[in-house]
Image: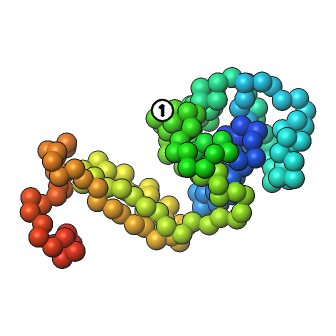
């Protein structure tokens, strides 16, 4: 059986490096190798990526970088299909503007990936990171409950607190048989929800 892989796509920007500390820690927790993938519309010659990153390039020391040319979301998803990573860890956008929710590349990868995608805000920078909490939105369906096992295992291996939040639409009918829905009447939610 081959070693699991964490896929870390980079676009050559310093902002994208914010995902590196997160990918390293998740790789340690999952006992997975880190596969760094540079994707851009133009090929970088020699050490051009390292020179573009400046001082932060030393963060990539010891890693092999797989380089691909093409549309980033297409190349990231193609690489993920080939290497079947345990997860893809990437920045939610690599633009310098704060407050941006998701870039086009992150949105497409999140939508089409067949593995978990961890999105990192570029504002966090390259400071060391460790897993403290794992937050899971739960819609009350049996299929979401079945998907909790890998998340619970990740939280346990990473010695993190597992937080499950029940998220539901009180006006919608249950989408799946056996779903846990909201009560029709909640007088004092702080007392009745746990019941």
Q: Is residue 90 visible?
A: no
Q: Position of residue 76 (x, y in %)?
A: 62, 32
Pinpoint residue 28: horizontal percent, then vertical percent: 65, 60
Query: Where does the image place residue 70, in percent across and percent down from the top left?
Result: 69, 23
Q: Is residue 21 visible?
A: yes
Query: Eyeballing the image, is 105 above or below 59?
Result: above
Picture layout, residue 31 above or below residue 65: below
Q: How is the protein colored in the picture?
A: rainbow
Who is closer to the viewer here, 147 or 104?
104
Write down the quadrant of residue 66 in the picture: top right
The answer to whether residue 51 is left or right of residue 139 is right
* Disc 1 crowd, CA 10 A, few/some/many (<14, 14-19, 20+): few
Coordinates of residue 30 in the picture (x, y in percent): 58, 57
Query: Which residue position holds label 1?
Result: 112
At horizontal 62% and vertical 66% (from top left) the residue drawn is 130
Position of residue 114 relative to residue 91, above or below, is: above
Of 182 and 63, nearer the camera is: 182
């Amino acid at each position: 059986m081959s070693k699991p892989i964490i896929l870390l796509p980079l676009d050559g920007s310093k902002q994208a490096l914010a995902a590196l500390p997160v990918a390293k820690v998740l790789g340690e927790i999952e006992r997975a190798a880190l596969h760094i993938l540079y994707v851009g519309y133009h090929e970088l010659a020699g050490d051009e990526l390292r020179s573009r990153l400046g001082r932060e390039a030393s963060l990539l020391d010891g890693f092999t970088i797989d380089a691909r040319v093409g549309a980033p979301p297409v190349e990231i998803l193609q690489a993920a299909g080939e290497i079947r990573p345990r997860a893809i860890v990437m920045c939610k956008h690599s633009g310098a503007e704060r407050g941006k929710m998701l870039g086009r590349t992150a949105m497409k990868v999140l939508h089409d990936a067949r593995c978990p995608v961890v999105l990192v805000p570029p504002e966090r920078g390259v400071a060391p990171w460790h897993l403290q909490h794992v937050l899971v939105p739960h819609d009350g369906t049996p299929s979401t409950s079945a998907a909790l096992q890998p998340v619970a295992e990740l939280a346990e291996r990473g010695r993190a607190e597992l937080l499950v939040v029940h998220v539901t639409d009180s006006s919608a009918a249950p989408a799946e048989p056996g779903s846990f829905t909201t009560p029709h009447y909640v007088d004092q939610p702080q007392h009745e929800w746990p019941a």
